[in-house]
Image: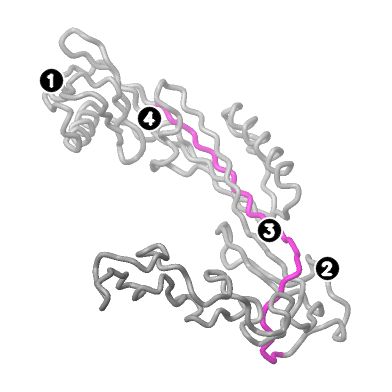
């Protein structure tokens, strides 16, 4: 396992340069303080970020129907249907979430469409099969202020005074193509598998300064361990006892929480992220801020030289 105790060592010049760089990105922070403050101490520590990934497969079966257009039918006459876990299917990429749908072999039959009663069409859901809808401009009254007929009374120009307009959904036919059989009047009825590949991610952070722990999750550091197996083992032998206990608990909890899924692969990654706690003095007042990550990001919630409230430098 790689050594992580001395990563990210910064001197006073590095710290001040990092602070000035981040202050330059925020118009509410003054540069004068960063230039003039006295840096008394730089305490280097390393935050630890542990990530456990469990790539799982879950299968659910249900009856499904779609249009029968004359394709070959794989029905019970071809053999006994396999169990859901015997149906071949593989993930496209490990540790990437996706869902796939697979027809279970030997379960398909052809039957008349139940939704349209094998007619191929259903009443339009917009006009309820009438072919006409109430005019939205005049609300069905037929009257309006835009045109006048020969008798001198006003009428709606949108519906020409009829109060009704042809339904655009069914083009006035009152019927629409059946959404199940697509007009073919017959459907394939079969068992379909929904196969979900899900990457479950658990994280644990050890960061022993007053800086919020979550900040080190999204910055660069040094990978000191990475393993990928069908089932990973806890970090036995690692020097930090808290991280060892955390890995044991997370692996055990992971097995219990995903008991209804099949774990295909697990991957665990342990990173060390440099954190420098900087103690400084400005105009007789003591303060502190943090430089963290290989990018040298700044966390300075109490920076004294602000021209407006509500701002932060991260």
Q: In the rendered structure, find residue 57 and report the number of the disc placed on it.
A: 3
Judging by the rendered image, the residue that carries numbered circle 1 is 36
Q: Residue at x 63, y 54 (%)?
A: 55
Spatial CA distance of label 3 from label 4 is: 38 Å
> Farthest top residue?
284
Alpha-carbon neighbours of circle 1 within 10 Å: few (<14), some, or many (≥20)? Answer: few
* Residue 199, x across and y down, in percent: 59, 53
Question: Which element carries disc 4, helix, strand or loop?
Answer: strand
Which sits earlier in the primary sequence, circle 1 or circle 4? 1
How many other residues sit within 10 Å of disc 4, few (<14), some (14-19) or many (≥20)? many
Q: Main secondary structure of the magenta part?
A: strand
Whole-number angstrom distance, CA of label 3 to CA of label 2: 15 Å
**Marks 4, 2: nearer the viewer:** 2
Q: Quadrant of the C terminus?
A: top left
Question: What residue range appears in magenta?
Answer: 45-71
Quickly name the residue at label 2: 83
Identify the residue under disc 4: 275
Residue 132, compared with residue 68, is above or below; it is above
Q: Give residue 284's position: percent from left, percent from top.
A: 18, 7
Q: Give the foreground label among 2 and 1.
A: 2
- Residue at 26% of width from left, 26% of height from top? 310
124 w.r.t. 252: above or below? below
Q: Secondary structure at mark 1?
A: helix
């Amino acid at each position: 396992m790689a050594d992580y105790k001395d990563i990210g060592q910064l001197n006073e010049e590095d710290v001040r340069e990092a602070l000035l760089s981040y202050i330059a990105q925020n118009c509410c922070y003054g540069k004068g303080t960063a230039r003039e403050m006295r840096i008394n101490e730089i305490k280097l520590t390393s935050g630890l970020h542990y990530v456990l990934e469990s790539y799982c497969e879950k299968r659910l079966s249900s009856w499904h129907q779609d249009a029968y257009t004359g394709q070959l039918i794989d029905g019970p006459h071809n053999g006994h249907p396999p169990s859901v876990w015997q149906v071949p299917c593989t993930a496209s990429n490990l540790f990437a979430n996706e869902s796939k749908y697979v027809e279970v072999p030997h379960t398909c039959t052809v039957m008349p469409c139940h939704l349209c009663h094998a007619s191929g069409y259903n009443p339009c859901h917009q006009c309820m099969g009438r072919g006409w809808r109430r005019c939205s401009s005049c609300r069905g009254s037929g009257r309006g202020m835009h045109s006048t007929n020969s008798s001198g009374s006003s009428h709606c120009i949108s519906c020409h005074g009829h109060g009704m307009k042809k339904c655009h959904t069914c083009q006035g036919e009152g019927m629409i193509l059946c959404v199940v059989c697509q007009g073919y009047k017959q459907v394939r009825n079969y068992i379909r598998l929904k196969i979900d590949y899900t990457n479950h991610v658990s994280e644990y952070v050890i960061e022993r300064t007053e800086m919020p722990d979550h900040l080190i999750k999204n910055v660069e550091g040094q990978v000191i361990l990475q393993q990928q197996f069908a089932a990973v083992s806890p970090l036995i032998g690692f020097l930090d006892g808290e991280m060892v206990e955390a890995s044991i608990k997370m692996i055990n909890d992971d097995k219990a929480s995903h008991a209804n899924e099949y774990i295909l692969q697990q991957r665990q990654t342990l990173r060390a992220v440099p954190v420098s706690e900087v103690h400084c003095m400005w105009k007789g007042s003591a303060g502190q801020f943090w430089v963290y990550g290989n990018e040298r990001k700044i966390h300075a919630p109490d920076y004294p030289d602000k021209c407006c409230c509500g701002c932060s430098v991260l």
